[in-house]
Amino acid sequence: MSKSLPYSVKDVHYDNAKFRHRSFFKVITQTLFTSDMKRECVSCSTGKFLGLFMIFGLACLMLTHASKTPSVTDGLSKVLGTNEEQKVVTDVGLRFKKLLRRAPRLPPRLSGNEKVSSGIFTGKPNDHDEEKWKARQRNVKEAFTHAWSGYKKFAMGYDELLPLSMQGFDGLGGLGATVVDSLDTAMIMGLEEVVSEAGSWIESNLLDRISQKGDVNLFETTIRVLGGLLSAYHLSGGDQDMNLANTGPKPTIYLEIAKNLADRLLSAFTSSPTPIPYSDVLLKNSSAHPASNLLSSTSEVSTLQLEFNYLSAISGDPKYKTEGMKVFAHFKTLPKVEGLVPIYISPHSGEFIGQEIRLGSRGDSYYEYLIKVWLQLRSIQDGNFTYLYDMYEEAMRGVRHLLVQKTIPNELVFVGELPGGSKGSFSPKMDHLVCFLPGTLALGATKGITKEKAMKDNLLTIEDFENLKLAEDLAKTCFEMYSVTSTGLAPEIAYFHTKDFYEDGLGGGNQSSEYVNDIIIKFNDRHNLLRPETVESLFVLYRITQDPKYREWGWQIFQSFEKYTKVDSGGYTSLNDVTTLPPQRRDKMETFFLGETLKYLYLLFGDSSVIPLDKFVFNTEAHPFPIKDAIYLEGGSNMMKGIM
């Protein structure tokens, strides 16, 4: 890729000899006025007089040249008379004026540490910047410690902490979800005391919990508990290529518990008459049943494969991968709307139910896992998983064509919904959950390497560039969903002002925001659950574009979390209304605040070599799994060969 010129297009068009022809007279005058003769002549009165005389003589020559040169103008002048003569005089005056104009002074060349017009940040942070971000990373680490201290003090062993009432709550089946969800974050942060506490609890209690508990949701249990165990296995040295934990149980403990849990979760697949699993599992007797509406969410059944694939790879047992990948193979055969799919599917018929299409709840992570599972499996010999990438690309074309619109008046880019499955029923509504998409688009474009390297190696297609542009535009919108509110924290759902939709009096409360008239926040949507999707995308985009603005945006969001959601006694709490001050608090700390939100912020502010995106893939709960050069042997017991 060619480097940018050290000047603007305006300068080039102005009077640069390299790009624009100069007249004979201009060459003479500029030579005379920039030579040693000029300096010698102007030093005496005679020289000054001669200089003025020379200018006058050149002007006369130009007048004579203009009047004597045969042209069509001569014939026209006889007809047009004095008007044309005045025009000739004017033209000569303009030429004379140009003689006296200074040549443009070009700005200095850009150094290698500055931004260039290509949009890629090529500079390296200086020592001051590095110290600043290390300090901010320590702030995130302290926030995690504060969150864990509240959980440990009031809710250890429960799924979630209720920080205001200072007690625990089992909302995810009673498997101690916060313990498992937080473990790999503590490992990455180097918090050995937390790793020891969480690991010891898992070793002593989790198998008993699994064998005694009843109903759990297949999706939530897989992404939080199974995913957390598998990530802890790898980060504690289970694959012998990384060990971030010097305390806690041996990696094999995490693996054995993960296998026990996954064996029970498999009943959701084996009990269903189709490749689409049931949504709920009775762990204590390894049975499964559909949800009360007899349907499964599209995102839930298609957001299990990273976990089950990795478990097969490290355990040597293909059954987990086999069941999980049946879902995608089945999805491949189903009709779609330009690659987009409805948000419900029947495990009994295997068909989509309804026409509602969205990238928010019940639809989101289907699209995320298409590209991530392909990244996980693409190096497998004879794997034939290119259909996943094809489905992803088709879906992103559908997003750009059917779901992307711009707001009024400031043209924020957002992704809406199709309540009826057609373009005519477009709704300018976007869940905060959709803010996963910028990161996914960027990851899909460069496959985890930096944009600079991808461009240098000529790896990006036109579609990749389009997806990167959409990623950056959407990230901007997601950030403005935060900055438009009084608290600086985003609502759960936002609507957008378009030519077809507007509701007055439903702003975010920050009247100084440029986008106060673009974003509409309805009363029932003003809560904030400490969600990670925006900071996840900021993390991925920073790693890929190296643009420091994503770090700055993440820091602003973190400061708002600190200011309005931190509970003095320990933990952080959700909010009921982000548009008013002081905000009303909701009394719940979701497991993903420790497992995802703080993890992504910590990685955003840290060194990009930690958990690199071209060597790891994060599940939808931010648990990193290594991408390995693997050979899967059909029906074999030794399924993994090679290292990261």
Image: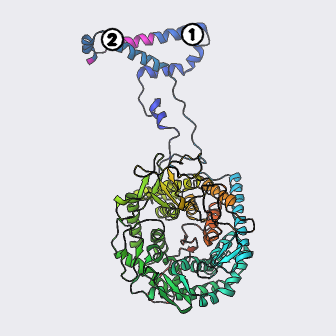
The disc label shown at residue 508, or none: none
- At mark 1, the secondary structure is helix
Name the spot of residue 444 as percent of width and height, x first. Answer: 47, 64
Seen in the picture, residue 130 relative to 154 is either above or below; the reply is above
Q: Residue under circle 2?
A: 85
Distance from the alpha carbon under mark 2 to that under mark 1: 32 Å
- Reply yes or no: does residue 59 show up in magenta: yes
Q: Is residue 74 visible?
A: yes
Tell me which amino acid carries mark 2. Glu
Q: Which residue is mark 1?
A: 48
* Crowd tier of the residue under label 2, counting other residues whose Cα lies within 10 Å: few below 14, some 14–19, many 20 or above: some
**Which secondary structure dominates the residues rendered in magenta?**
helix
In the rendered view, tell whether residue 111 sits above or below residue 634: above
Q: Image quadrant of residue 37? A: top right
Residue found at x 50% / y 55%: 472
Q: Which residues are magenta?
A: 57-72
- Going from the N terminus, do you reach mark 2 or mark 1 first? 1
What is the count of numbered marks? 2
Q: Amino acid at mark 1?
A: Lys
Q: Would residue 562 appear left or right of 436 to someone viewing this image?
A: right
Whole-percent x, y for residue 530 in the image: 61, 65
Query: Is 426 or 3 nearer to us in this picture?
Result: 426
Q: Nearer the viewer, mark 2 or mark 1?
A: 2
Q: What x and y, as percent, mark residue 229?
A: 61, 80
The relative height of residue 565 versus residue 273 in the rendered view (above or below) is above
Q: Secondary structure at mark 2?
A: helix
Choose top left, top right, bottom left or bottom right for residue 151: bottom right
